[in-house]
Amino acid sequence: MTLGALAAASSSVSDDVNAGVIAFLIVAAMGVALVFLLRSMNKQFRKIDANPLEPGPDDGDGVGQDAKAPAQAPE
């Protein structure tokens, strides 16, 4: 019984684990990477047209004033 008590007492000391500096550096690096990814994502979102279904003055589809005019027969 005393052997079991000694084994339990010695194992509790070895189970004491700290996160350490390396774990903090990994989490801090992930935080810095997240900040840069969010900044990049915001730049990409600003490039997106707010309402792509609403036609603009020149939406580049080839349909304009010239396409709506009736075709004239050559003389």
Image (tube, rainbow, N blue to C red):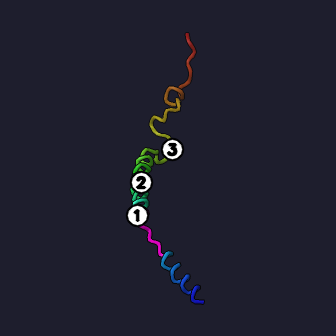
Residue 48 picture location, percent across and down: 46, 45
Distance between mark 1 and mark 2 Cα atoms? 14 Å
Distance between mark 3 and mark 2 Cα atoms? 31 Å
- Whichever of labels 3 and 2 marks the residue nearer the N terminus, that label is 2
Q: Which residue is mark 2?
A: 33
Q: Secondary structure at mark 3?
A: loop
Q: Which residue is mark 3?
A: 52
Which quarter of the image is occupied by the N terminus?
bottom right
Tell which of 13 and 42 is nearer to you.
13
Magenta range = 16-24
- Whichever of labels 1 and 2 marks the residue nearer the N terminus, that label is 1
Q: Secondary structure at mark 1?
A: helix
The amino acid type, in three-letter code, at marker 1 is: Phe
The residue shown at (55%, 10%) is 75
Q: Secondary structure at mark 2?
A: helix
Tell which of 2 and 11 is nearer to you.
2
The residue shown at (46%, 48%) is 50
Observer-side mark, 1 or 3, equals 1
